[in-house]
């Protein structure tokens, strides 16, 4: 396992106080964003949040990422847990390719068709760093915040016990309703 771990630092945010720890893994840098009481909780809430610069930072309405991230940070600051900021932008095709995928979506392709037309699978994410982060932080039992069955499957494959699944459902808008429908109908998301 080729993983590099940073020291832990404090991160005060508008959502609450957190600690952060960075990980370098296969040329990508990821973050564990932990509530202050994280280590004392037997089954912490965990959100694995895949990077979406257009949503997370720019407030794009084409997806539900920023709202999900805000929901998770607010909830975890209050209830204890961790957000893994999984830096696999665009379901791991990268920002450049995601912009090209968006350009194809402007011409009528859905989120899956656009990926495939660019030569990618519908979802190129690899969650193995999440397993390394769980191991590093001694995570054995969690309450997982997600609608994505692939994330549930991955966490279960680690032998980590999911004692509860908390949905992360955001109200649709006119820009993301087709995207959310594709996730539900064709990607099996629990929406
Ligand atoms: N390639 C591509 N990636 C996208 C698109 N829209 C969002 N993403 C990326 O998809 C990832 C988020 O995936 P989502 O399907 O919203 O959510 P999820 O992480 O699979 O599941 P949840 O845990 O339920 O939120 C982020 O990496 C986004 O950058 C798109 O149209 N094309
Ligand atoms: Zn997004």
Image: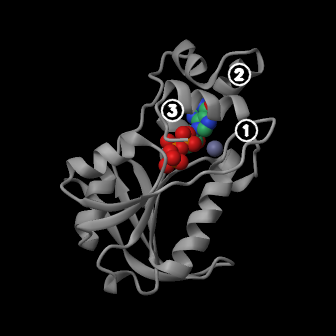
Examine the image and state in which quarter residue 44 appears: bottom left
Q: Are marks 2 and 1 in contact (CB under 8 Å)?
A: yes
Q: Are marks 1 and 3 in contact (CB under 8 Å)?
A: no
Q: Is residue 152 visible?
A: yes
Which is more toward the observer, 164 or 63? 164
Does the numbered disc 2 mark a residue whose Cβ is under 8 Å from ligand 1? Answer: yes
SS at mark 1 in the image: loop
Q: CA distance from mark 1 to mark 3?
A: 17 Å
State the residue at coordinates (38%, 65%): 143
Give the residue number, with chain letter if any, for mark 1: 62
At which x and y percent is residue 138? Answer: 23, 72
SS of the residue at dot 2? helix
Residue at mark 2 to residue at mark 1: CA–CA distance: 10 Å
- Disc 3 vs disc 2: which is toward the camera? 2
- Which residue lies at the image location 26% right of the left edge and 58% below the top edge? 132
Along the viewing direction, whichever of 30 and 177 lies nearer the viewer: 177
Residue under numbered circle 2: 105
How dense is the environment of label 1, judged by Cα within 10 Å: few (below 14), some, or many (20 and up)? some
Whether 170 is drawn above or below 75: the answer is above
- Quarter occupied by residue 131: bottom left
Q: Earlier in the sequence, mark 2 or mark 1?
A: 1
Q: Residue at x 55, y 81 (%)?
A: 78
> Is residue 34 depicted above or below 88 in this figure?
below
Q: Residue furthest right?
A: 174
Residue 118: image x %, image y %?
55, 16
């Amino acid at each position: 396992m080729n993983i590099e771990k940073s020291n832990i630092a404090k991160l005060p945010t508008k959502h609450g106080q957190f600690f952060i720890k960075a990980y370098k893994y296969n040329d990508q840098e990821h973050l564990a964003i932990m509530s202050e009481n994280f280590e004392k909780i037997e089954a912490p809430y965990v959100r694995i949040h895949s990077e979406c610069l257009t949503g997370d930072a720019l407030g794009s309405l084409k997806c539900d990422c920023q709202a999900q991230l805000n929901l998770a940070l607010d909830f975890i600051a209050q209830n204890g847990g961790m957000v893994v900021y999984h830096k696999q932008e665009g379901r791991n095709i990268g920002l450049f390719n995601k912009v090209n995928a968006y350009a194809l979506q402007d011409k009528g392709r859905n989120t899956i068709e656009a990926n495939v037309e660019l030569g990618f699978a519908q979802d190129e994410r690899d969650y193995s760093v999440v397993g390394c982060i769980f191991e590093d932080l001694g995570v054995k039992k969690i309450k997982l915040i997600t609608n994505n069955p692939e994330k549930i499957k991955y966490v279960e494959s680690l032998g980590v016990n999911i004692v509860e699944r908390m949905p992360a459902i955001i109200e649709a808008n006119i820009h993301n309703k087709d995207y959310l429908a594709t996730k539900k109908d064709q990607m099996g998301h629990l929406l």
